[in-house]
Every structure is written in C-alpha cells, then in structure tokens.
Image: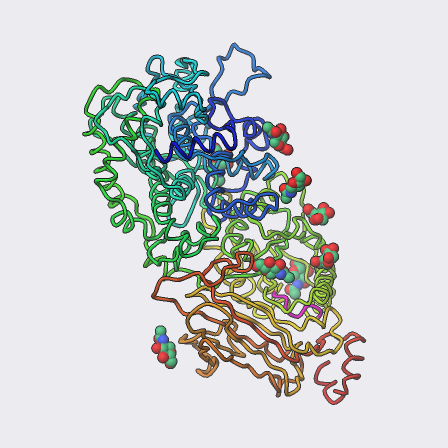
C-alpha cells in the first residue's frame, strides 16, 4: 500500500499532470517528429549510438533550467520522450490525404505495456518543457527510447538479408473484441481511489471502447517488408540495445516499489487469478515486460513454445540509424530488447548501491561507466561486456517467473490480442523464460570483457581536430569515414572537438563542436552539397594560419596552459594536388607560426610523393584511403589516419607566447588533468617553449586526487612513451619512467634539452605521459565534481610548468627582436 499512499500524496500535492505520451494519439510535442519532413527523415537526425544518447542526456543535465537528479531525470525521460508503438497507418488509395490527420498512432503492442509502465513509474512533475532540446535532438531521443516496428516496404529489401524467413507472414494478432485502449493511464484521481478502497471496481470515466480492426488490417496489408525497421535501438560496442528498456530499468530501480496488480489494472478482472498479488517495478520495466508481450501475443496465436530473440542488423556500419530485423514473426522480444532489458535490470537493481557509493551521480555518467571497456559502475563486473555473466548471477529464475506471471496477467487486461488465453499461462511463461536463458547463453554473442579489455584504446583523447574537406567527395563515401573518426577520437563534452574546414580556402564549413549530436545534425547531405569543391593548399594554409594564430592570442587571454592537442587532417579526393613553392612557403609560415599543429593528409589517390615535403614523416602522415559509398571498409581504411590522430600528445604551452612568440617566461602555472585507472594521457611540449631554456625550466606532475600510483614516462624520440614497451629501432633508454605515489611529485627538467641541435626545427619535442595503472579493486568515487571529470573514479593530477619560454622558429622581425632583447645573440644563427 506504500505505493498507493505515495500516489495519493502526489496527486494531492501536485495535482495530476496529463501525460501525453500515455494517450492513444501521438503526443503533441512529438508530432513534429512525424510531420516535419526534415525530422521524419532519420538520415537528417544524429545516428542512434550510445555516445550520441549520452551527449543528448548530458545536454538536458547541463540545461540551467532543469535541475533533476538521476532518479527524476530518468523518469522524466520516459514520460516526456518515450512513446512506444507508434505506427504508420496507410490510407486507402481513394481517400485524399487530409491536412487534419496525421497517419501515425501508437497502436503496436509495445504501446500498451508502455502505458502500464507509466503508471508503475509515476512522475509527480510536469513533463520537460518543449524547448528543453532543439527539435532534431528531441526527435532523435524519442526515436532512441521508443520501441516500435515499422513494417512498411521500403524498396531496399533485396539487400536486407535472407527473405525465406518471413515469407509465411502470419497474422500474429488482431484485436480482441471490445478491449479498451483509451483508459486514462496517468491519473488516479481521489474519487477513483476512494471508490477502489471501497472495493468498488470501476473503469475510468474517460473510457471509450475503441475498436481499430480496420487500422490493424490495413497495417497488415502494408506490413510486408522482409526486414522491418525496429526503432528505439541504440548501437553500442556490445550489441544493439533498446534504450527504452534501459532507461525504464534505471527509472524503476531508482524508486523500486511493490505495486499491487489490481492497482495496475484499475480493477479490471484478471483473467488469471493464481499469480502473486504485487510486482516489483523493475521487472515490468525490463525483462518481464517483454516476456509478457511475447507470451500473450504468441500464446494467443496458438504457440506452445514462446520464441524470444530476433536478430537483426544495422544497414550501415558507421553512423547507425536503421536497425533491421531479420524476420517479421516473433518480434515481441528482439535481441536489442533483450540487451536493453538486461542492462536496465542490472543498472536498476544495483542503483541503490551505486547511489550509496556516489549520491550525485548523473544519468549520463552512469551510462558512460556501464558502456565503457574498463572499471564499470563502481564494480568492475558491472559493465556491458559482462552482460552474459551478470544475467547468470543477478537474474533469479524463481523471481523472474513469479514477476512475469503476474505482469502477464496485468498486461492481458489491456493488450488487444488475436485470441483469449483461457489457461496455461504458467507453462507459457516458464517456457519463455527457459528459452530466454538459453538464448542469452547461446545466441547473444557480443564481445566479452576479456576481448574488450585487450582491444581497447587505452588513451582518452582531447584533440581539437580540424578536418579540411574537399566538397567533391561523395557524401555517402566520406560521411561514414568522418563518422568513424568522430567516434574513434571520442568527440564529446570531456573529449575531442571537430571542426570542418574547406580545402578550397580554409574557411569554416561546420563550426567547432564538442557534441557528436550537434555535429551529425549539422553535417547532413544537404549541407555537404553546399560545400565548395577543389583544393587550394596555398590559400587554405594562409587562412588556417590566421585562424590558429587568433586562437593562440585567445589562449593568452584565457591563460591556457594546454591540455588538448590540435590536428589538421586534410581529406582530399582529387588527385594531382597543386603543391609548389608558394604552397611550401605558406606551409612553412603555418608550421612555424603554430608550432604544435600536427598535419596529416588522407587522399583518395596516392599523393605520397607530391605532398611529402608538407609533413614530418611522410610514410605515416600521408595515407591513401579508398572510401566506397556505404562505408563498408571504413574501419580498415581509416585505421592509419585514426592512429595518426591518436598519437598526437596534448599540448603543454606557455600561454604568454601567443602568436608572436615574444620572449617571456611563463612563471609557474598549474594545469589540472584527469586520467581513468587503466588509461594513459600523452603530452607534448614543443621546443619553441624550451629551446634555449634556463636552468629553471621544468615540469612537475603531482597527484591531487584518486587512489593508486601514477606512472610518468618521458622521451625525446617516442611520441607515445610508456612503461614496458619495446620499441624496435630505437635505443632502449629512449623512455624513462618514474612512479608517483600519493605524495611528492615527479620533476622533468628541461634544462639544455636542445643542446646539440642547431635549430628549433631540428630539436625534438619533449614527450611525456601520465598513466594510471589498472585497478583490481572496485573503483570508488573520488572526483565528485561532475563538471570537471568524466568518471567519478578519475585520478586527478596537476601539471605544473615553470619558466617555459617563447622561441619563435619563424623568421619574423618580432621574434628576432625578442631574442635580441633577451641577449641570446649567440644563439641567433642557430635559431634562424
Ligand atoms: C515544440 O517546439 C517546436 C519547435 O520550437 C514547435 O514547432 C512545436 O509546435 C512545439 N510543440 C508544442 C506542442 O508546443
Ligand atoms: C531557460 O528558460 C528561459 C525562459 O523560459 C529561456 O529563455 C531559455 O532559453 C532557457 N534556457 C535554455 C538553455 O533552454
Ligand atoms: C538504410 O536504410 C534506410 C531506410 O531504407 C535508408 O534511408 C538509408 O539510406 C540506408 N542507409 C544505408 C547506409 O544504406
Ligand atoms: C579542451 O578540451 C576540453 C574538453 O575535452 C574542453 O572543455 C576545452 O574547452 C578544450 N580547450 C580548448 C582550448 O580547446
Ligand atoms: C559559426 O558560429 C558563428 C557564431 O556562433 C556563426 O555566426 C557562423 O555562422 C557559424 N558558421 C557556420 C559555418 O556554421
Ligand atoms: C577568440 O575569442 C573571441 C572572443 O572570445 C571569439 O569571438 C573568437 O571566435 C575566438 N577565436 C578563435 C579562433 O577561437
Ligand atoms: C604535385 O602535382 C602537381 C600537379 O600534378 C604538380 O604541378 C606539382 O609539381 C607536384 N608537386 C610536387 C612537389 O611533386
Ligand atoms: C614493467 O617494468 C617494471 C620495471 O622494469 C616491472 O617492475 C614491471 O613488473 C613491469 N610490468 C609489466 C606488466 O611487465
């Protein structure tokens, strides 16, 4: 009765909020997602991937108008943006399209479970305001968490896998007579409650018994895609996941309660009496919800074995947007729904522990920690890669059986079905659970933790990447490659940024962004078609230099000591790129004026010889990439490019140098950085900051938070120095490492670091790294400021620079003058 009491209090305190997503029409604020052609076409929306979902959730968390904790936010997401089961309804060909009719409505079976769920996970708040997210992100989020199947024929069915499976289309359901679909889900008003307390069973007043046989049959006529699209699916490295189940599990776990079944069915007479009287919220939100759907839909179709699991795939390997099922039958508990249900169940049931460890954990962090290769949610076992083992450890069969039987009985009172089950529900439920367990153990072959750990990239990138793009690329060929880069370099709030520049003149095509969702929203095919074509390296270099030098001046204003790296990547499709003396001269001005800039080229035709004078190491820095439309070979072909970007260390600079490199000492300045256990950060100091350094030029690393030792390595020859690596062709003492405990610091002395090198250009940079060795114990929350660190278990450390200088490798007057001023006349000839 606790649940009932809580509801009563809420109803009294706040009044009842209408929940548009529970009503049997498309919620008003979601309608534009089905009306505006730009939003209807999902190719214009960001791809449905976990980093994009996390990014959108983080935007809501960072919205100053919204102050919701993890519990409230996950609930509000369900109430505001989730509306399952929205389907297209074909009009007869002889009926003209009506401007007052939207041919979409929530009629698929998943909707009915969703409505029950909104009662199980109530909200005492108004839904999030319509201006919380821009329309494109609102629709993307809606699509990512709302489960439905779009069975319309698209025309691309010949490419979507084996057709044999679904030829025998079976009508899996048609409406059972006189099932109410319009009962008002959200509101338990006081009158109703008191009547129920009196043992009075009554239906809600607004009820109307709507039959929609025609809608269903028209949909079935239409529904002949060999591989229907399953919506509400988010791609992760550990398989496609129904994010609605995931968020629902978290929301349910955050307010775990026992709900009386009769409360849920609003007094409808249960078809099956012999079930436990209450259900625990997390079950219907996750596993029991999908199992009950499968039992009821397949059971009323006359099956005696309940089939769970329906594989499918994305129709692209990059920028995934369309998840296509491999068949049309038994689609009540598809693979993504199984994964989402499991993940939601694990995160939901462990949430009390999680929040005990760290009470102000954000939803974005929870997802980020679970869908990441190492460390997990304050428990190294609680990771997506461990899904199968977790299902064996955490899902107690007896509990699942009891909960699923009970929820099946409840769902049966609201779900329109093609028949009436008059008995045998226990056997069907038991069968579905056995089949689910077998399916999880034998068929969900997602990458496991051992492989995940060994294959992971163990550095977190903070790269400001500028892609200089030739508009003559075909969008279908270059977009998958760029999407792959965006994901590989971790474009995100705590990671890298991306900017698109034009290869014809270096102008900005797409502004710098740290948001993958925003980037994908901007970089559409339509936008690409407006990009200038052609390559002019001379003009591009000149304009890019001016932009970057402005940035260096900005960095002086901001007192920026470093922490990000900068990479300029040319993606060129044309051959025979004009490279002459003027280009070389501009190139020299660029590299000398912006010393930390890393230049990489990736070209459709081999330009190794023609461009080799523009990079440091031609063989590594110039790549030939063969991109095809559809992006099937993207990962392989882009690997050298991605590795090139990943190997550029974060800059450490003297902010006073600006763009002019007028000599001045940095004095002592401090930069705070974070590293995850099991990860390593690489840094790079340009000789322009220590070429002729005095005896005080040094860098110190000291720990300021977190647990465990840090390992600090440095090298002059290896850009990514680390412990216990063997570097062929380099002397073994190329890397020096020191271990830093809880106190003290590691000091890197840069005095005379360019001794013996005649020019700044000849003197190699100073490379160093900070590594937090992997932990074997469960991580705790040590970084509690979620605006600073990505994960609460991050190890914080400080990099202190002392007396970095400014030396211009350029030939400009200001630099020479500065050097004169500093009385380093002797060195003039060496420097210039
Ligand atoms: C929500 O906002 C969008 C874009 O501003 C607008 O077009 C739409 O009409 C709004 N919907 C409602 C229900 O206010
Ligand atoms: C916050 O609310 C105000 C007033 O409604 C609005 O003008 C502003 O744009 C909102 N800010 C954000 C970030 O949505
Ligand atoms: C995937 O399928 C959708 C829907 O048919 C289509 O719009 C999109 O272009 C396809 N994507 C790829 C990469 O083939
Ligand atoms: C460096 O990266 C962080 C996020 O990774 C970002 O917040 C910051 O603005 C970046 N700084 C610069 C100067 O690009
Ligand atoms: C970049 O941002 C600026 C200011 O925010 C804006 O004026 C400009 O139009 C944007 N450029 C592009 C290409 O989006
Ligand atoms: C430099 O800062 C100014 C003002 O903050 C800003 O308008 C400009 O875009 C910045 N320039 C660069 C290249 O970041
Ligand atoms: C690069 O190719 C262009 C066009 O074919 C040619 O004019 C130029 O001389 C080449 N440059 C180099 C450095 O080979
Ligand atoms: C790395 O090298 C150090 C010192 O040589 C050694 O103590 C340590 O066990 C090595 N670690 C691994 C993983 O090989």
For image coordinates 23% across by 22% down, the residue present is 302
Q: In front here: 149 or 139?
A: 139
What secondary structure do most residues of the magenta stretch adopt? loop
Residue shown at the point (24%, 20%) measured from the top left: 421
Q: Residue at x 44, y 16 (%)?
A: 205
Residue 539 visible here: no
Task: Report the span colored magenta.
Answer: 593-598
Q: Examine the structure image and report whether residue 319 is included in the region drawn in magenta.
A: no
Which residue occupies the extreme top position in the image?
A: 94
* Image location of residue 739, percent across then percent down: 44, 78
Q: Is residue 203 left or right of residue 396?
A: right
Q: Quadrant of the C terminus?
A: bottom right
Quadrant in which ligand 8 is drawn? bottom left
Counting from the top left corner in percent of width and height, residue 439 is at 25, 41
Q: Position of residue 788 (x, y in %)?
A: 55, 60
What count of labels does the image hold? 0
Location of the N terminus by quadrant is top left
In the displayed structure, 754 sits above or below 434; it is: below
Vertical position of residue 219 compared to residue 614: above or below: above
């Amino acid at each position: 009765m606790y649940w009932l009491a809580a509801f009563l209090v809420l109803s009294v305190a706040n009044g009842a909020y209408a929940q548009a997503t529970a009503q049997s029409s498309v919620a008003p604020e979601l309608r534009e997602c089905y009306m505006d052609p730009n939003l209807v076409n999902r190719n214009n929306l960001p791809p449905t991937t976990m980093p994009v979902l996390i990014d959108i959730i983080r935007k809501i968390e960072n919205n100053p108008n919204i102050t919701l904790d993890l519990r409230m936010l996950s609930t509000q997401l369900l109430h505001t943006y989730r509306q399952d089961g929205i389907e297209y309804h074909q009009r007869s060909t002889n009926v003209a399209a009506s401007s007052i009719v939207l041919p979409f409505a929530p009629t698929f079976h998943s909707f009915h479970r969703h409505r029950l769920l909104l009662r199980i996970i109530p909200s005492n708040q108004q839904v999030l305001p319509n201006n919380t997210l821009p329309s494109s992100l609102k629709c993307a989020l809606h699509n990512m968490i709302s489960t439905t199947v779009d069975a319309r024929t698209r025309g691309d069915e010949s490419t979507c896998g084996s057709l044999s499976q679904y030829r025998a289309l079976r009508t899996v359901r048609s409406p059972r007579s006189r099932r109410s679909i319009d009962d008002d889900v959200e509101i338990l008003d006081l009158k109703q409650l008191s009547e129920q307390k009196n043992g009075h069973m009554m239906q809600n007043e607004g009820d109307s018994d709507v039959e929609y046989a025609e809608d269903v049959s028209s949909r079935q006529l239409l529904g002949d895609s060999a591989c229907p699209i399953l919506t509400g699916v988010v791609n992760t490295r550990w398989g496609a996941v129904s994010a609605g189940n995931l968020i629902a599990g978290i929301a349910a776990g955050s307010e775990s309660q026992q709900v009386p079944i009769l409360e849920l069915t609003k007094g409808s007479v249960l078809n099956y009496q012999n079930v436990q009287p209450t259900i625990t919220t997390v079950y219907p939100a996750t596993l029991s919800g999908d199992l009950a759907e499968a039992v009821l839909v397949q059971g009323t179709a006359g099956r005696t074995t309940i089939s769970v699991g329906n594989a499918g795939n994305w129709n692209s390997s990059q920028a995934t947007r369309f998840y296509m099922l491999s068949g049309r039958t038994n689609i009540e508990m598809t693979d993504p729904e199984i994964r989402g249900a499991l993940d939601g169940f694990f995160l939901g049931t462990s949430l009390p522990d999680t929040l005990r460890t760290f009470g102000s954990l954000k939803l974005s962090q929870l997802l980020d920690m679970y869908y990441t290769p190492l460390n997990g949610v304050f428990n190294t076992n609680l990771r997506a890669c461990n899904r199968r083992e977790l299902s064996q450890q955490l899902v107690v069969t007896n509990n699942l059986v009891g909960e699923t039987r009970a929820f099946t009985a409840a769902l049966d009172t609201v779900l329109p079905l093609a028949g009436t089950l008059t008995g045998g529900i226990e056997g069907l439920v038991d069968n579905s659970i056995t089949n689910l367990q077998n399916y999880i153990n034998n068929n969900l072959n997602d990458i496991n933790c051992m492989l995940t750990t060994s294959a992971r990239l163990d550095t977190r990138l903070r790269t400001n990447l500028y892609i200089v793009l030739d508009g003559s690329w075909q969008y279908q060929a270059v977009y998958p490659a760029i999407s792959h880069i965006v994901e590989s370099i971790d474009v995100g709030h705590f990671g890298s940024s991306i900017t698109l520049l034009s290869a014809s003149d270096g102008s900005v095509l797409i502004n710098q962004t740290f948001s993958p969702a925003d980037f994908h929203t901007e970089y559409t095919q339509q936008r690409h078609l407006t990009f200038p074509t052609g390559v002019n390296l001379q003009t591009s270099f000149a304009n890019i230099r001016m932009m970057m030098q402005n940035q260096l001046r900005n960095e002086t204003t901001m007192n920026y000591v470093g922490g990000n790296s900068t990479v300029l990547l040319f993606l060129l499709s044309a051959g025979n790129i004009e490279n002459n003396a003027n280009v070389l001269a501009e190139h020299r001005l660029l590299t000398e004026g912006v010393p930390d800039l890393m230049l990489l080229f990736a070209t459709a035709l081999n330009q190794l010889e023609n461009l080799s004078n523009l990079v440091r190491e031609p063989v590594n820095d110039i790549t030939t990439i063969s991109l095809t439309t559809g992006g099937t070979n993207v990962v392989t072909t882009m690997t050298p490019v991605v590795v090139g970007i990943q190997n550029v260390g974060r800059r450490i600079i003297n902010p006073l140098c600006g763009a002019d490199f007028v000599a001045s000492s940095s004095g002592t300045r401090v930069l705070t950085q974070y590293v995850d256990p099991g990860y390593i950060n690489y840094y790079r100091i340009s000789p322009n900051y220590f070429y002729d350094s005095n005896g005080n030029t040094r860098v110190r690393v000291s720990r300021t938070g977190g647990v465990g030792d840090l390992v600090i390595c440095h090298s002059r020859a290896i850009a990514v120095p680390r412990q216990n690596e063997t570097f062929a062709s380099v002397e073994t003492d190329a890397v020096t490492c020191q271990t830093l405990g809880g106190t003290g610091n590691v000091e890197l002395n840069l005095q005379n670091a360019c001794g013996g090198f005649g020019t700044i250009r000849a003197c190699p940079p100073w490379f160093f790294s900070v590594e937090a060795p992997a932990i074997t114990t469960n991580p705790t929350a040590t970084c509690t400021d979620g605006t600073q660190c990505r994960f609460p278990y991050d190890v914080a450390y400080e990099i202190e620079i002392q007396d970095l200088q400014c030396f211009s490798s350029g030939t400009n007057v200001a630099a020479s003058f500065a050097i004169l001023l500093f009385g380093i006349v002797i060195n003039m000839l060496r420097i210039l």
